[in-house]
Image (cartoon, helix red, strand yellow):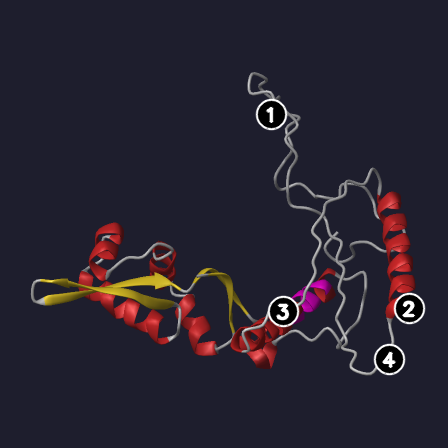
């Protein structure tokens, strides 16, 4: 079973968005049959079988084993991945294009970049899997807490300068046998709300507890790199 699978086919994407099928797919993280799934979900065995056939047709589940029970054969199935991501390729006609309106301070341009990342990695991963090779990638996920918007802007400026220098040092347009790699760096407010009262015996004052709907960037934005339309 894969950790993550990318859905590129529009028909498969439509199948995955059905709430009943998504529920069955989640249940099949562990092997199961139409009989066991019917008991878990409260659906009829016939209805479960109908959805399982559709999921299997589009590659979301696969046969693990067949068990003989009297005059019947029970098919045991399992999901092909723990989770799934729908590629922008499934909506090719309306997929975002980051080359259309480049804006380093736009959250929407960041979304377009992220969409392209999913599409390209999905295609590369499919090719690498078919060739039985590993895909050479590198990713960093970190979190930084800025005291002020000015600090955030200064950080973004220094980061851009450092990356530009690093790219200039290693980029070789004429290297024989060289291969281009795409580099993308994103900085955005975190959705995580810090636990300001870690002690379970301390009951926070409701008037001071963080509001989950509050602006994650409460301070004003100075000139320079930082959030724009969603600030």
The residue labelled by disc 1 is 206
Mark 2 and mark 3 in contact? Answer it, CB < 8 Å.
no
Q: Which element is circle 3 on?
A: loop
Look at 87% across and 76% down and name the residue there.
Answer: 172
Task: Decide: few, some or many residues near mark 3? Use Cα within 10 Å; few <14, some 14-19, many ≥20.
Answer: few
Q: CA distance from mark 4 to mark 1?
A: 59 Å
For residue 65, side relative to residue 99 (left or right): left
Distance between mark 3 and mark 1 Cα atoms: 49 Å
Q: CA distance from mark 2 to mark 3?
A: 24 Å
Residue 150 image offset from top left, x and y in percent:
89, 45
Magenta stretch mostly in which secondary structure?
helix
Task: Measure how far apart labels 4 and 3 are at the Cα level.
Answer: 22 Å
Disc 4 secondary structure class: loop
Q: Position of residue 89 (x, y in %)?
A: 57, 77
Q: Is residue 37 left or right of residue 126?
A: left
Q: In the visual, does 192 lie left or right of 30?
A: right
In this orientation, which residue lies closer to the viewer: 95 or 119? 119
Name the secondary structure under disc 2: helix
* Quarter assignment of residue 163: bottom right
Q: Tell me the distance, in whole angstroms, between the alpha carbons under discs 4 and 2.
A: 11 Å
| Label 2 with label 1: CB-CB less than 8 Å | no
Question: Closer to the camera: disc 3 or disc 1?
Answer: 3
As measured in the structure, the alpha-carbon distance from the residue carrying label 2 to the one carrying label 1 is 52 Å
> Is residue 114 one of those drawn in magenta?
yes
User: Closer to us: mark 2 or mark 3?
Assistant: 3
The residue pinned by badge 3 equals 135
> Is 54 situated above or below 159?
below
Looking at this view, name the residue that lies furthest to the left.
71
**Is tag 4's residue or tag 2's residue first in the polypeptide sequence?**
2
Q: Secondary structure at mark 1?
A: loop
């Amino acid at each position: 079973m894969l950790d993550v699978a990318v859905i590129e086919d529009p028909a498969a994407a439509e199948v995955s968005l059905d709430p009943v099928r998504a529920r069955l797919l989640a249940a099949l993280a562990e092997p199961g049959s139409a009989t066991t799934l019917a008991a878990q979900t409260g659906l009829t065995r016939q209805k479960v079988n109908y959805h399982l056939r559709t999921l299997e047709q589009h590659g979301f589940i696969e046969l693990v084993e067949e068990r003989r029970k009297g005059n019947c054969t029970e098919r045991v199935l399992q999901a092909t991945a723990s989770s799934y991501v729908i590629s922008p390729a499934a909506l090719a006609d309306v997929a975002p294009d980051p080359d259309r309106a480049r804006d380093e301070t736009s959250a929407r341009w960041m979304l377009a970049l992220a969409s392209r990342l999913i599409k390209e990695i999905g295609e590369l991963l499919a090719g690498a899997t078919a060739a039985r090779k590993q895909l050479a990638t590198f990713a960093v996920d970190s979190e930084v807490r800025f005291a002020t918007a000015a600090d955030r802007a200064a950080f973004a400026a220094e980061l851009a300068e450092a990356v530009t220098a690093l790219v200039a040092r290693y980029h070789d347009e004429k290297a024989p046998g060289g291969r281009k790699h795409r580099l993308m760096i994103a900085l955005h407010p975190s959705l995580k709300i810090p636990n300001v009262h870690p002690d379970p015996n301390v009951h926070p004052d409701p008037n001071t507890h963080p509001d989950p709907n509050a602006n994650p960037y409460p301070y004003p934005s100075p000139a320079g790199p930082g959030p724009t339309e969603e600030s």
